[in-house]
């Protein structure tokens, strides 16, 4: 275990960005006696960091804005942290260790953390700059989308991934006079997380709720009216959709501009090592604006582990450093339970276990390699998802419990117990397995 770019307690630590990663880092730092005493945070948004994940339930009207607040400005002051809001850092001068904001403020630093997150990736198509085209990233976007939902009309969401579907369902739930269409480039929804069966189940559910889902949809251009407002979406195959607004949720672009501008090693995002140190040892980068071993980030789970490493590093505490591990995906649409991790397509080396209860719309599929779980897709009853994920991370060998695996931890435990105590485990386990399958008579193997 080692530390590299630590701060001394007398150093001035400046953090650019006051989003989810920055906030979590500050929470971790202020608990440490060896923390840098002077910490300044500069955020471009007008409010202190909030729970961005909850923008989807906020849009859907399932939550009030106050519930998103993480800490108010008074808390920062109580922790001895200077919080500057509504100011964007525009330039970084590494030679003089200073930065400048869009309001003309200049600040010097001993150590800098860049935690600028990312922004919606905009497809490179004519008309993308038209009025009425929105992203879904912050509170302002959530407000704009709420207005769109309440005004009614034809909303077209570009992107049938996690974020696009949450935006589409939020719009539908929030407005009574709105027609919402989702355009997905791939042949199925959430193609990076779901297999074909689960994607079809999801599509059926959302269609029944009133969303129009169009797959294999490549956007060619957006058409505007004389006032420069979007009115139509044209697809590459000639189809056209009426659009009073367009919501773009087709991926994210890391906010790495400060890295580029100041000459830090930057590829898709700002490149960091396992201690989150950039190519300049006085500068760290964290969260969605950083790139580690070729990977960039879009979920909080890995970012929380980065925060632990960076907080330890900055406070001079030992740490093993950051290592990538797989993440699981959940969808935040009420009434739709979905849990997935690992590859979506089975390869020749995979042992595929699946279960499909057509009546209940309950679907489970596990991909095993050499008796270890490598991927799972659960739709409907997702209660065993975290257990499968744990087994996958731990690399548990589960071949001996194969016949119980689709039913989850409790059934596997029964077999495990039996294998430890019964002299005739194999007989018991086969009986157990057949009784389990016959108790699911409405089910069929997918
Ligand atoms: C609607 C929505 C739903 C989501 N749902 C999930 C989910 O269910 N599960 C999950 O794991 N993740 C989810 N995410 C992703 C998650 O929110 C992000 O992974 C997380 O917020 C990343 O944290 P970050 O600090 O890197 O970036 P952010 O939280 O985006 O924070 C970056 C901050 O830096 C500010 N900034 C940028 N440039 C500058 C500058 N030059 N100067 C000053 N400030 C600057 C930005 O304004 C922003 O406030 C969701 C995201 C959205 C938008």
Image (cartoon, rainbow, N blue to C red):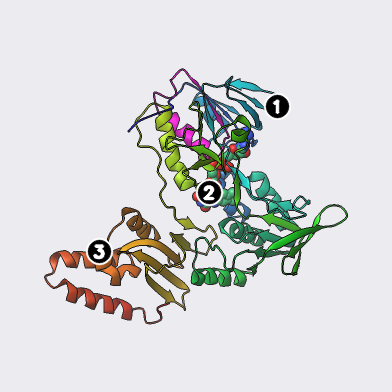
- How far apart in space, not on screen, are marks 1 and 2 (Cα)? 30 Å
Q: Which region shows up in magenta? A: 7-35
Report the residue that reaches farthest toward the right.
226
- Given residues 64 and 19, the one toward you in this image is 19
Snapshot quadrant of residue 246: bottom right
- Reply above or below: 286 against 413: above
Question: Please, what secondary structure does the residue beneath circle 3 have?
Answer: helix
- Reply above or below: 196 against 228: below
Write the residue at 37% across / 67% down.
349
Question: Which is more N-terminal, label 2 or label 3?
Answer: 2
Q: Is residue 183 visible in the rendered structure shown here?
A: yes
Q: Is residue 51 visible in the rendered structure shown here?
A: no
Question: Please, what secondary structure does the residue beneath circle 1 have?
Answer: loop
Residue 202 highlighted magenta (yes or no): no
The percent position of residue 278, horizontal first and vertical second, equals 50, 33
The percent position of residue 172, horizontal first and vertical second, equals 65, 62
Q: Nearer the viewer, mark 1 or mark 2?
A: 2
- Given residues 209 and 269, the one toward you in this image is 269
Label of residue 383 in the image: none
Along the horizontal axis of the image, is 198 left or right of 355?
right
Question: Which is more N-terminal, label 2 or label 1?
Answer: 1
Write the residue at 43% across / 75% down.
356
Label 3 sits on residue: 413
- Given residues 420 and 289, the one toward you in this image is 289
- Reply above or below: 187 against 61: below
Snapshot quadrant of residue 328: bottom left
The percent position of residue 427, horizontal first and vertical second, equals 18, 76
């Amino acid at each position: 275990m080692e530390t590299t770019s630590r701060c001394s307690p007398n150093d001035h630590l400046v953090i650019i960005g006051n989003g989810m990663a920055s906030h979590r880092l500050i929470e971790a730092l202020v608990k440490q006696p060896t923390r840098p005493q002077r910490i300044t945070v500069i955020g471009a948004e007008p409010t202190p960091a909030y729970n961005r994940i909850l923008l989807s339930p906020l849009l859907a009207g399932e939550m009030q804005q106050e519930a998103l607040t993480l800490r108010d400005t008074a808390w920062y002051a109580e922790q001895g942290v200077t919080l500057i809001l509504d100011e964007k850092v525009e330039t970084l001068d590494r030679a003089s260790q200073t930065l400048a904001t869009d309001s003309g403020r200049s600040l010097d630093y001993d150590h800098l953390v860049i935690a600028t997150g990312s922004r919606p990736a905009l497809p490179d198509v004519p008309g993308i700059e038209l009025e009425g085209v929105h992203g879904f990233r912050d509170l302002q976007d959530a407000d704009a989308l709420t207005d769109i939902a309440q005004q009614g009309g034809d909303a077209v969401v570009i992107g049938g991934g996690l974020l696009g579907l949450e935006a589409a369902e939020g719009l539908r739930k929030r407005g009574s006079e709105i027609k919402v269409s989702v355009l997905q480039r791939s042949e199925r929804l959430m193609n990076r997380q779901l297999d074909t069966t689960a994607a079809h189940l999801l599509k059926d559910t959302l269609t029944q709720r009133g969303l129009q889902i169009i797959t294999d949809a490549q956007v060619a251009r957006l058409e505007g009216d004389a006032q420069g407002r979007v009115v139509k979406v044209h697809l590459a195959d000639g189809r056209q959709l009426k659009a009073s607004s367009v919501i773009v949720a087709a991926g994210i672009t890391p906010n790495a501009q400060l890295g580029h501008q100041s000459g830090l090693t930057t590829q898709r995002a700002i490149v960091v090592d396992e201690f989150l140190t950039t190519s300049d040892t006085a500068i760290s980068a964290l969260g969605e604006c950083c790139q580690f071993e070729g990977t960039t980030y879009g979920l909080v789970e890995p970012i929380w582990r980065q925060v632990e490493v960076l907080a330890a590093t900055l406070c001079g505490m030992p740490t093993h450093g950051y290592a990538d591990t797989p993440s699981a995906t959940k969808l935040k649409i009420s009434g739709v339970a979905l849990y997935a991790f690992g590859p979506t397509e089975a390869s020749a080396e995979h042992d595929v276990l699946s279960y499909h209860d057509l009546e209940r719309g309950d679907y489970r599929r596990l991909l095993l390699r050499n008796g270890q779980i490598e991927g799972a897709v659960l739709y409907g009853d997702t209660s065993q998802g975290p257990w499968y994920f744990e087994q996958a991370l731990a690399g548990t060998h589960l071949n001996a419990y194969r016949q119980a695996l689709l039913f989850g931890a409790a059934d596997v435990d029964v077999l495990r117990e039996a294998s430890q105590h019964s002299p005739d485990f194999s007989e018991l386990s086969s009986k157990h397995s057949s009784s389990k399958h016959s108790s699911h008579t409405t089910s069929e193997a997918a």
